[in-house]
């Protein structure tokens, strides 16, 4: 018998939490619900859910405080579902450790897709990178042993910095990485806040791996937030 993933939905609007619960339950998940931040923190430690769907605007605390608290002791996947549409809210939530950010209103299909990605990351090591150190999606291959990105088996000739960007995104395929996170991971905190070097490298990467750089198939821009690599095969 397959063990069902348990998901905690944290939202004080009962119509929203009821909708999310219905969607998730009908797709084979066990769902528990909380309407406050303090109760949610208690339920996370006592019920050990596999994933949290979290609203930011809670009656007793801000959802970002929950993200910070949870990240201090566990990598439990967190998907933020919020009516806040400002880029800084998305960036803050992701930088604090949220795995994804959905803006209300949203459809059932999009919610389920984000849940599947987050759970898949939690259940696997290094996303969809195979034991032989290779990530593949469509015609793109990222070979960690050869330090190459290939299209249809042909090396596209990424520079060292370009490969570092692509390899970081591939290791987190399906997840949004903020500009500051990428900058800090690759160049250290001294360049944090200056995205120009990253944007220049990304433009070069897209010219090398995308059929049409203006309509990318592999690396997508979350405007004002960061980049997301499409999931692997």
Image (cartoon, helix red, strand yellow):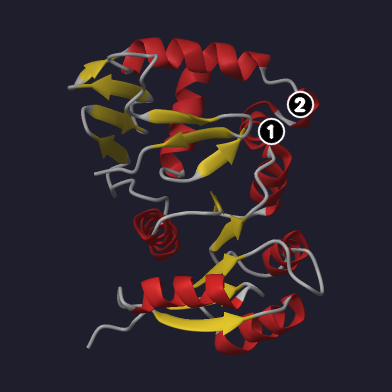
Task: Name the residue nearer the viewer: 27 or 128.
Answer: 27
Residue 200 falls in which quadrant of the image?
A: top right
Q: Marks 1 and 2, how far apart in space?
A: 6 Å
Q: Position of residue 49 (x, y in %)?
A: 52, 79
Which residue does the image show at 45% across and 77% down from the upper left?
21
- In this rendering, position of residue 85 left or right of residue 218: right
Pinpoint residue 16: horizontal percent, then vertical percent. Answer: 54, 70
> What residue appears at the point 76 percent right and 80 percent down from the top-left corner?
38
Q: Mark 1 points at which residue?
A: 180
The label on residue 41 is none
Does residue 170 sit above or below 11 in this rendering?
above
Q: Earlier in the sequence, mark 1 or mark 2?
A: 1
Quarter-of-image position of residue 107 = bottom left
Q: Can residue 157 be seen in this view?
A: no
Q: Residues within 10 Å of mark 2 (few under 14, many from 20)?
A: few
Residue at x 65%, y 44% (from the top left corner): 85
| Front in this rendered view, residue 20 or 174 | 20
Dot 2: element:
loop
Image marks 1 and 2: residues in contact by CB distance under 8 Å: yes
Instruction: Classify the position of the C terminus by image quarter.
Output: top left
| Quadrant of res 13 | bottom right
Q: Is mark 1 on a helix, strand or loop?
A: helix
Q: Residue at x 63, y 69 (%)?
A: 74
Q: How crowded is mark 1: few (under 14 residues within 10 Å), some or many (20 or more)?
A: many
Image coordinates of residue 147 in percent, x first then y, are 38, 25
Q: Image quadrant for the N terminus?
A: bottom left
- In the image, is 114 to the left or to the right of 68? left
């Amino acid at each position: 018998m397959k063990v069902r993933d348990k998901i905690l939905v944290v939202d004080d609007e009962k119509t929203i939490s009821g909708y999310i619960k219905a969607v998730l339950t009908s797709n084979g998940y066990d769902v528990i619900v909380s309407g406050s931040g303090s109760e949610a923190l208690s339920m996370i430690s006592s019920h050990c859910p596999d994933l949290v769907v979290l609203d930011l605007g809670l009656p007793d605390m801000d959802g970002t405080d929950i993200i910070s608290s949870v990240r201090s002791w566990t990598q439990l996947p967190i998907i933020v579902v919020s009516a806040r549409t400002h880029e800084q809210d998305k960036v803050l939530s992701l930088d604090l450790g949220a795995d994804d950010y959905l803006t209300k209103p949203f459809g059932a299909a999009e919610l389920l897709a984000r849940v599947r990605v987050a759970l898949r990351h939690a259940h696997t090591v290094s996303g969809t990178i195979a034991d032989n150190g290779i990530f593949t999606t469509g015609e793109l291959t990222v070979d960690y042993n050869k330090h190459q990105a290939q299209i249809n088996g042909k090396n596209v000739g990424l520079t060292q910095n370009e490969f570092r960007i692509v390899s970081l995104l591939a290791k987190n395929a399906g997840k949004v990485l903020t500009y500051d996170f990428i900058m800090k991971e690759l160049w250290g905190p001294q360049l944090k806040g200056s995205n120009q070097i990253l944007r220049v490298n990304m433009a070069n990467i897209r010219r090398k791996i995308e059929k049409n750089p203006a309509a990318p198939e592999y690396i997508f821009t979350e405007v004002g937030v960061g980049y997301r690599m499409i999931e692997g095969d």
